[in-house]
Image (cartoon, rainbow, N blue to C red):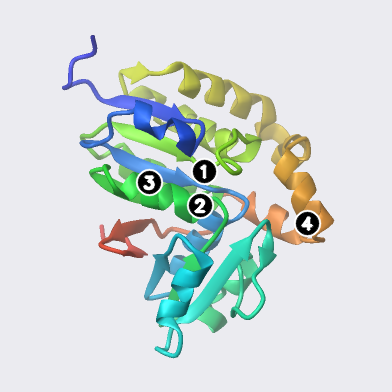
Amino acid sequence: MISPMVKRLEVCLTPALLDLYDIEDSIVVVIDILRATSSIVYGIDNGATAIIPVAQVEDCLLYADKGFLLAAERNGEVVAGYDFGNSPFSYTAEKVAGKTVVLTTTNGTKALHLAQQRAHKVVIGSFLNLDSLYNWLKMQNRSVLLLCAGWKDNFNLEDTLFAGAVVSALRKEFHHFDDSSVAAEDLYHLAKSDLRAYINKSSHSHRLAALNIEEDVKFCLQYNICTAIPVLVGEQLVALQA
């Protein structure tokens, strides 16, 4: 049995497995690379005051006519009648600086709400803020769970690859790794020389290709163009303060 004083670094490959993990004292990093967490990081980095994740499309309507931007995505597409979905190009400074966005997505916001129920702290990860996230996590004296949002409770490649990148960066800082973290790191090392080519194998990449949003995919695979780490405070994602 692992001592509770030992810092654990674990990877949960799908929200459907989250109940198997003890996260009450852990930092949970929610990962939805294509595209929710990439867009959240980009929006907060570009000066959005907050992003409010909600579970259902209908929940966005509770914020209508109150000065919020409403963003809703299902199955990769913008829900009709909403300001935008979860494309990172909708989260530029020109569109979101000084504003609050209410967001619901197919996978990412579901994972956020599940993590929020039990985790000590919930933060957002993407390739866009990998170094900032890594540097912050290594300074925290807590276990870390990397929660892959997956696709409708199924495993996916892109979230697992990012989890592997974090495991690789943090390997010297932690003492215990589960098998999922070992597998994720191995996959990342296989893919890192050409992430886009490797992710082209993924089912979600093909879904997005059918929607003609290849530029979104390329954007989300950029390393370290952002420094912000969104953190869930109450019901809102805001910039983590150093």
Residue at x 55%, y 62% (from the top left corner): 39
Label 4 CA crowd tier, 10 Å (few <14, some 14–19, many 20+): few
Residue 156 in the image, given as x and y percentages of width and height? 62, 36
For mark 4, give the secondary structure: helix
Pair 4/1: label in front: 1
Is residue 237 at least partly visible in the picture? yes
Residue 131 in the image, given as x and y percentages of width and height? 45, 46
Q: Which residue is mark 1?
A: 149
For mark 1, give the secondary structure: loop
Q: Distance between the Cα atoms at labels 4 and 2?
A: 19 Å
Q: Distance between the Cα atoms at labels 2 and 3?
A: 10 Å
Q: Which residue is mark 3?
A: 114
Res. 108 mark = 2
The answer to whether mark 2 and mark 1 are in CB contact below 8 A is yes
Q: Distance between the Cα atoms at labels 4 and 1?
A: 20 Å
In-image side of 200 versus 90 (left or right): right
Label located before the other in sequence (2 or 1):
2
Q: Quadrant of the N terminus?
A: top left
Q: Quadrant of residue 155?
A: top right
Residue type indicated by callout 1:
Ala
Q: Nearer the viewer, residue 56 or 134?
A: 56
Pair 3/4: label in front: 3
Q: Which residue is mark 4?
A: 214
